[in-house]
Image: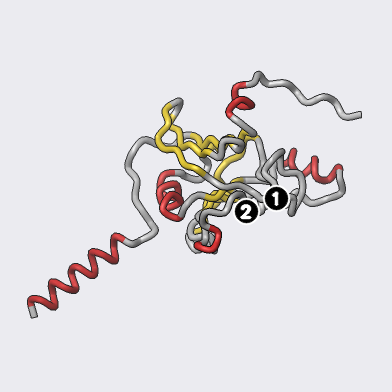
C-alpha cells in the first residue's frame, strides 16, 4: 500500500512538472522587442534584457505586413491584447495588429490588412524550418511557456526590421503623391 501511495505521489509530481502553464514572479516585462533580420525577440524591463530568444517569422519576412496572406510580420509599435491557452500552436499571445494606420494602408491597395498576429509556439512538424508562419512570431513550445507567463496584456511590442533600423533616427514618411 505504501508503495502504491508513493508511486501515485511521484506520478502527481511529474504531472505537475509537465504543465504548459508556468508562474513568474520576477521583474515586470515592460516591453517586447523584436528584430526581424536577426531573428531575435527580447523581453525587457526598462532598458534591461530579462530574456532573449531565437524566433521564426512569416514565409516572406522582409518588409512591413501590408495585406492578408502576404507572409510578412508587421513592423512598428503594437501591444499584447489577447491570450490563447488552447492555441493550435501550443500557447499564444496576440499582438493588436492591425492598428488604424495598418487598415488605412491596406485599403489604399483595395485589400484587407489581415490580422491574428501572435507570438506562439511551434508544432512538431514545423520545428527547425525557417520562416514558416503566415506573419506571426514563432518560438519553441518551452519558450512560449515562459513568454506566456511573463508577458501581460497591454505590454508594448516594438517590431523592427533590424537592430540598425531600431537605432536609426525617426524620419517621417514622405507625403503620398
Please identify the residue farthest to the top as the structure is shown: 169
Vertical arrangement, residue 28 with respect to residue 111, above or below: above
Which residue is at a point 75% across and 23% down the rendered structure image? 172
Circles 1 and 2 in contact, beta carbons < 8 Å: yes
* Residue 59, horizontal then vertical, whole percent: 67, 50
| Image quadrant where one finds the C terminus | top right
| In-image side of 57 versus 91 (left or right) | right
Q: Give the secondary structure at mark 2.
A: loop
| Image quadrant where one finds the N terminus | bottom left
Which residue is at a point 29% across and 60% down the rendered structure image? 17
Query: To which residue does mark 2 refer?
Result: 133
* Residue 160, horizontal then vertical, whole percent: 62, 33
Which residue is at a point 34% across and 45% down the rendered structure image? 24
Q: Give the secondary structure at mark 1.
A: loop
* Residue 118, horizontal then vertical, whole percent: 58, 50
Query: To which residue does mark 1 refer?
Result: 71
Which numbered circle lies on residue 45? none
Q: Image quarter for residue 7?
A: bottom left
For this rendering, which residue is in front, 47 or 156? 47
For this rendering, which residue is in front, 146 or 39? 39
* Residue 85, horizontal then vertical, whole percent: 48, 60
Q: CA distance from mark 1 to mark 2?
A: 7 Å
**Badge 1: residue crowd in 10 Å (few <14, some 14–19, many ≥20):** many
Q: How is the image coloured?
A: secondary structure
**Badge 2: residue crowd in 10 Å (few <14, some 14–19, many ≥20):** many
| In-image side of 152 versus 7 (left or right) | right
Please identify the residue farthest to the bottom as the structure is shown: 1
Sequence order check: which comes first, mark 1 or mark 2? 1
Amino acid at each position: 500500500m505504501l508503495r502504491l501511495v508513493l508511486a501515485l505521489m511521484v506520478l502527481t509530481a511529474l504531472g505537475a512538472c509537465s504543465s504548459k502553464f508556468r508562474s513568474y514572479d520576477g521583474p515586470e516585462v515592460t516591453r517586447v522587442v523584436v528584430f526581424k533580420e536577426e531573428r531575435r525577440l527580447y523581453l525587457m524591463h526598462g532598458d534591461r534584457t530579462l530574456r532573449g530568444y531565437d524566433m521564426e517569422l512569416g514565409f516572406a519576412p522582409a518588409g512591413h505586413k501590408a495585406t492578408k496572406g502576404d507572409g510578412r510580420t508587421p513592423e512598428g509599435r503594437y501591444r499584447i491584447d489577447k491570450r490563447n491557452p488552447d492555441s493550435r500552436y501550443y500557447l499564444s499571445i496576440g499582438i493588436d495588429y492591425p492598428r488604424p494606420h495598418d487598415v488605412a494602408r491596406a485599403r489604399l491597395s483595395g485589400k484587407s490588412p489581415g490580422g491574428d498576429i501572435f507570438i506562439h509556439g511551434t508544432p512538431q512538424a514545423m520545428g527547425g524550418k525557417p520562416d514558416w508562419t503566415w506573419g506571426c512570431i514563432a518560438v519553441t513550445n518551452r519558450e512560449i511557456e515562459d513568454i506566456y507567463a511573463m508577458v501581460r496584456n497591454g505590454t508594448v511590442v516594438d517590431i523592427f526590421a533590424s537592430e540598425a533600423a531600431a537605432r536609426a533616427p525617426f524620419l517621417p514618411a514622405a507625403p503620398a503623391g
